[in-house]
Image (cartoon, rainbow, N blue to C red):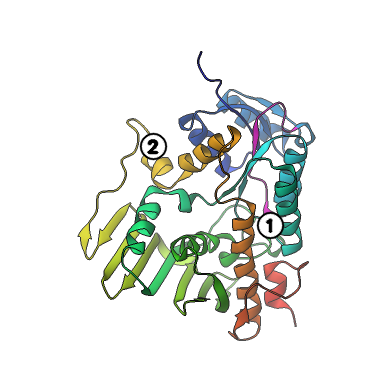
Amino acid sequence: MARRRPTLALAGAGMISVVHAMSASLAGFDIVAVASRSEERARERADQVGARACRYQDLPAGADAVVVATPPSCHVDDAIAAMEAGAGVLVEKPLATTLADADRVVEVAERTGRPFVYAENLVFAPVVQQAAALARTLGPLHHLSVRALQPRPDWGGFLDPSWGGGVLFDLGVHPLAVALLIAGEDPAVAVNARLERGEGIDVDDHAVVEVHLASSLPITVEASWRHPTTVWDLQAAADTGVVRAELQPGLLLEHNGDPVPTAATAEGADPRLEGLGYVAQLGVLSEALRGGPSVFGARFGRQVLDIVMAAHQSANQGGATVALPFAGPRDQTPWQLWTAS
């Protein structure tokens, strides 16, 4: 007997919902419902994916899991509602806008035992997984840097302080998550950060963060909306060699300067969806729905947010060292921590 295909509902019908919808098909899901703040947008996206439009309060609308792709301030309430209704969830980054809300979603995920995947697609990307595995063969690292550089967004609410923060909060969580993946069991213990705000906006558009690990390895993370093109890359170095990877503008992996073949994408698949981890993260959700582990779950998303909060307080204090776990206010957004007088 053929195994029943798992079903998904989309909470949010913005641009990222298209990516999730395309990836869902490749990962073996059927999309059955789409909800949005706009009934028109919900119907439009539902028609595109062969689903039905519904209201947020109707979710999970019979689906096995809900992809939460709403604005960051809505992530926690939408995820909790889905879990309390018996569904699994995949929650877009960043996990929440405050640590208090992040703690709420962690508590519900662990209490209910529902499958939960933090949608940090880059940690699922084959080239990142390969780079992390290669880095572990180098021995003790003395350098680790991860960058996400691209032009300033001209759509969405990313430049509005009510979103929660600027480039570090939205784009910077990608390189931070990749850095934590490569660091492995070496815990982050402190942060120093510098944030800059460009002309005509109220949020940061350039961020440089140093994350200090217990081993004394400093990790440098750079996130910027000032770059003319999109560049996402990483480099890890030890006395025995160097591993370098690119995710944008193309996929590339090198070990000591020599190219390393990256995991092939499925025949006929969009290499962007496979190569950037979108299909793999839904594959993890599918396995979790069948009783497998929810790797990179709510606690991982909260760990990334903890560093983001500490970085914003550090920037507020002129780059001072802020210890981790973050012990500051738990009810403030990153932008509020950065701009507090």
Examine the rendered structure and indicate whether residue 294 appears above or below residue 203.
above
Q: Is residue 80 left or right of residue 317?
A: right
- Residue 88 x/y as whole percent: 66, 38
Residue 177 point in image, percent of width and height: 51, 60
Q: In the image, is residue 295 above or below residue 64?
A: below
Residue 69 included in the magenta stretch of the image? yes
Q: Secondary structure at mark 2?
A: loop
Secondary structure at badge 1 equals: loop
Which residue is located at x 25 percent, y 49 percent?
A: 261
| Residue 325 on the magenta span | no
- Residue at (37, 33) in percent of width and height: 269
Q: Is 331 on the left-hand or right-hand side of 124?
A: right
Q: Main secondary structure of the magenta part?
A: loop
- Note whether residue 74 is visible: no
Image spot of residue 193 (x, y percent): 56, 78
How many numbered callouts?
2
Please state which of residues 341 and 1 is positioned toward the viewer in this rendering.
1
Instruction: Identify which residue, 201 or 9, lies in the foreground.
Output: 9
Q: Nearer the viewer, residue 113 or 102?
A: 113
Residue found farthest to the top: 1
Q: Which residue lies under the disc numbered 1?
A: 96
- The residue depicted at 49 percent of the width and 36 percent of the height is 23
Say which quadrant the C terminus sits in: bottom right
Which residue is the site of mark 2?
Answer: 270
CB atoms at circles 2 and 1 under 8 Å apart? no
Q: Is residue 166 above or below residue 93?
A: below
| Chain part drawn in magenta | 59-72
Q: Position of residue 151 (x, y in %)?
A: 47, 61
Specify few, some or many for label 1: CA neighbours under 10 Å numbering under 14, 14-19, or 20 or more: many
